[in-house]
């Protein structure tokens, strides 16, 4: 009973695939990854890139996290791991929107199929930073309107996850959620509330630090684990 | 929907006034509200249970039923109990008697360990220690590079013999246990007084990594093991904290990302379940955003009650010192307050973040929550647009604004002439007030400064009142409060001129930082005070 009701809330019928077009359709599709600090955005970008490369897509990564120390280096390591180019700022603390634009520009010039933009972590109550995120989305849209804006949520997050989703949803057109760190003891129940409020489906779950530890979201498995089965 | 505990309890008790004694059922209702508030704040369920049963005992006692306002009395009890748990064993860092003090950081991925390592090093360095950062996170790509950068910013050396995972290496090389050991030896050799070991993020259930952390602990025998935890963490806090307690037996807790708007109930769960003190709080992205943990503030935060101290600190952080001084100078010299000043004040206000958020931080605003909810943040932006559509001459002298100019401004800012009229009107009121202040008439009936519900009496949630808030807060920003000024003045007089300005919250206007000439200051201040 409870399981069925929960499953109903999770709604297995939602489309949980990445809307990044089919391989070889020639168009550039953009995905932007957003979230608060330390949820695993950069790692998620690396993992998604890996998935896309495995599907024979040409990918460009944009390191628009110009704030945290060595964030771009971290993304470059991921880029090297999966063999995709990374566009990064030449100086520390550059305007992230300009890096994003440069990445979009390069992706277009190289006729890449997918552009993945990694952004800096920002707490949703920092107005200035949220405005900055809005700018990144706008600027990228000039080259190619993002077909995916993924909000990364940490499974350990509590009630605040809902506020995060709400505020991020106001500045960026969220299309999906990535639930990370689900390999721990946390179950990430807050995504139920988030999905219900925003109507945005959970698309992936992160299950570890390895390059392959990204799995499609499995509604039934999720509900079972919520119920401790 | 976000009514805080204080409001809810007041509501629960509203019908009880006049009753001689509270019944069991009355208390049950109260306990239910408390439980809900705590769960809302992410306090773990078992902790909520024991906590509320403690509250129940006290609430049944005479102190509540005898109180004039039982609701507030219960809130007070809850608050006291929270502070007692959160700050039960408050203490500072323990330093080693001989040799370097070793501090080890542990926590989940993304809790903020590396950033915290830098902040802690910076903090200790300012206290005269000579910290050494040891990079024992060889797991995450470029974590070592991050620590290097952080160390560089803090001006603290970083010991990193192993590069960890970088572009060239797919697999982590090197052994974090050995790195930690070597780091300790290095520190002994180079006579560092503190060693901070940054470890990789790990999950509580990851046996392999947990035992590795335990090995690091054994190898360096730290004086303090700090468990770094994200304030946003939910119900999982207890499991994680217990796992880490068993794994590395931490001696203290650091709460990070407290600058977010999470209520941070996890703090309570962790303190209660592990019995370890929460020692520090990390409140921002800069190195200086690090402070000793304040149990009382955390209690208010968990209960979602007004947090005036945080508001003041936020104001201090974002207010532009130079700008505030320029304004103070201007007022004291009797210059007129112009629309340009109005604009700059407003922009500073906006820098502080959401106006709604700030208003809810003020105590006693609970009853006005609905009005605050209706408050339109964009109103500030609109006002800004109007002023920005004016020429500099118009900003300096709004009297210039005739009908034609007004319609030009309306077109330029995408507003209507009526909106401009009302802005000009509001501005003139503010200007009058400033003039009166400069003349020495004290503070003539500042709208809404009294605090409490009466202050916002005239606030129908409409546009006019919103505008009013800007001038009113702006005045506050320069400590327009006569009492406060008097205090500052007294403080300034009692001080030798060379003494540093006291850390008064909004004291920017009163004390130019260098060479405080008390006599002159007194005269200037006298203007405001009508002496």
Image: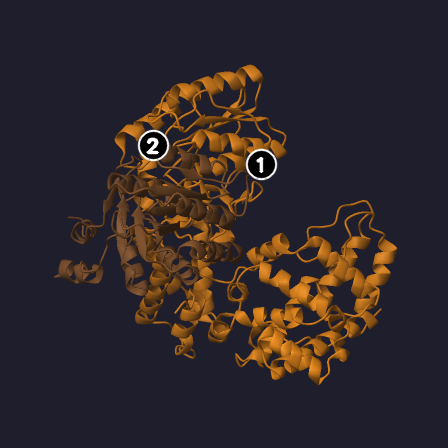
Res B152 seen here: yes
For the colour brown, the matching chain is A
Question: Label 1: which residue?
Answer: B123
Question: Can you tell which quarter of the image residue B110 is in?
Answer: top left
Q: Residue at x 58, y 34 (%)?
A: B154
Judge from the rendering whether residue B478 lies leftward or rightward of residue B296; answer left or right: right
> What subunit carries mark 2?
A
Q: Is B337 above or below relative to B35?
A: below
Res B472 seen here: no
Chain B rendered in what hue? orange
The crowd level at tag 1 (other Cα within 10 Å; few <14, some 14-19, many 20+) is some
Q: Is A43 above or below relative to A162?
A: above
Question: Label 2: which residue?
Answer: A81
Q: Position of residue A23 (x, y in %)?
A: 25, 47
Q: Position of residue A83 (x, y in %)?
A: 34, 34
Question: Can you tell which quarter of the image residue B319 is in?
Answer: bottom right
Q: Nearer the viewer, residue B394 or B443?
A: B394
- Label 1 secondary element: helix
> What subunit carries mark 1?
B
- Label 2 secondary element: helix
């Amino acid at each position: 009973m409870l399981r069925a009701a929960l499953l109903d809330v999770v709604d297995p019928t939602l489309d949980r695939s990445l809307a990044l077009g089919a391989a070889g359709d020639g168009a550039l599709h953009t995905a932007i990854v957003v979230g608060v600090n330390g949820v695993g955005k950069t790692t998620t970008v690396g993992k998604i890139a890996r998935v896309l490369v495995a599907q024979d897509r040409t990918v460009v990564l944009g390191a628009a996290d110009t704030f945290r120390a060595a964030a771009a280096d971290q993304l470059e390591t991921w880029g090297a791991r999966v063999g995709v180019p990374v566009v990064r700022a030449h100086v520390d603390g550059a305007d992230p929107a300009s890096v994003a634009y440069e990445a979009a520009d390069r992706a277009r010039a190289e006729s890449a199929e997918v552009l993945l933009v990694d952004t800096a972590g920002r707490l949703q109550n920092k107005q200035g930073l949220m405005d900055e995120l809005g700018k990144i989305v706008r600027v990228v849209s000039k080259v190619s309107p993002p077909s995916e804006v993924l909000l990364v949520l940490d499974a350990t997050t509590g009630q605040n996850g809902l506020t995060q989703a709400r505020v991020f949803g106001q500045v960026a057109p969220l299309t999906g959620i990535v639930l990370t760190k689900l390999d721990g003891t946390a179950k990430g129940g807050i995504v139920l509330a988030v999905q219900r409020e925003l109507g945005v489906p959970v698309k992936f779950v992160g299950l570890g630090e390895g390059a392959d530890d990204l799995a499609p979201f499995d509604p039934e498995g999720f509900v079972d684990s919520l119920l401790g089965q | 929907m976000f009514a805080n505990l204080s409001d809810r309890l007041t509501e629960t008790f509203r019908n009880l006034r006049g009753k001689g004694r509270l019944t069991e059922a009355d208390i049950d209702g109260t306990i239910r509200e408390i439980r809900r508030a705590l769960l809302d704040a992410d306090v773990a369920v078992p902790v909520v249970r024991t906590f509320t049963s403690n509250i129940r005992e006290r609430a049944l006692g005479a102190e509540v039923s005898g109180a004039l306002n039982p609701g507030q009395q219960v809130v007070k009890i809850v608050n006291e109990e929270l502070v007692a748990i959160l700050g039960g064993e408050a203490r500072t860092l323990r330093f080693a008697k001989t040799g370097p003090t070793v501090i080890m950081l542990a926590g989940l991925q993304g809790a903020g360990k590396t950033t915290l390592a830098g902040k802690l090093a910076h903090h200790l360095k300012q206290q005269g220690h000579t910290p050494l950062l040891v990079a024992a996170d060889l797991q995450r790509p470029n974590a070592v590079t991050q620590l290097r950068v952080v160390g560089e910013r803090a001006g603290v050396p970083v010991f990193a013999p192993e590069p960890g995972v970088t572009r060239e290496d797919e697999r982590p090389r090197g052994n974090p246990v050995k790195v930690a050991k070597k780091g300790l030896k290095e520190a002994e050799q180079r006579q560092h007084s503190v060693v901070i070991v940054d470890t990789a993020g790990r999950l509580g259930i990851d046996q392999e990594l947990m035992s590795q952390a335990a090995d690091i602990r054994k190898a360096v025998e730290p004086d303090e093991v700090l468990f770094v935890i994200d304030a946003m963490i939910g119900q999982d806090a207890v499991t994680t904290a217990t796992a880490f307690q068993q794994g590395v037996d931490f001696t203290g807790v650091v709460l990070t990302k407290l600058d977010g708007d999470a209520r941070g109930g996890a703090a309570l769960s962790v303190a209660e379940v592990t019995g370890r003190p929460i020692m520090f709080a990390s409140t921002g992205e800069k190195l200086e955003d690090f402070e000793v943990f304040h149990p009382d503030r955390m209690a208010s935060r968990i209960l979602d009650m007004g947090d005036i101290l945080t508001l003041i600190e936020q104001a201090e952080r974002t207010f532009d010192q130079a700008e505030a001084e320029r304004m103070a100078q201007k007022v004291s010299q009797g210059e007129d307050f112009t629309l340009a000043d109005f604009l700059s004040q407003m922009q500073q206000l906006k820098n502080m973040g959401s106006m709604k958020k700030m208003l809810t931080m003020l105590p006693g605003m609970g009853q006005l929550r609905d009005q605050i909810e209706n408050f339109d943040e964009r109103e500030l932006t609109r006002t800004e647009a109007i002023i920005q559509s004016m020429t500099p001459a118009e900003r300096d002298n709004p009297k210039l604004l005739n009908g034609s100019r007004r319609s030009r401004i309306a077109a330029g800012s995408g507003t209507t002439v009526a909106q401009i009229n009302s802005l000009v009107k509001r501005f003139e009121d503010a200007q009058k007030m400033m003039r009166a202040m400069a003349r020495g008439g004290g503070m003539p009936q500042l709208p809404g400064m009294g605090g409490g519900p009466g202050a916002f009496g005239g606030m129908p949630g409409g546009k006019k009142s919103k505008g009013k808030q800007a001038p009113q807060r702006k005045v506050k920003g320069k400590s327009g409060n006569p009492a406060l000024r008097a205090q500052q003045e007294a403080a300034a007089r009692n001080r030798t001129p060379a003494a540093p300005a006291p850390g008064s919250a909004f004291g920017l206007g009163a004390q130019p930082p260098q060479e405080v000439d008390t006599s002159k200051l007194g005269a200037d201040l006298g203007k405001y005070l009508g002496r």
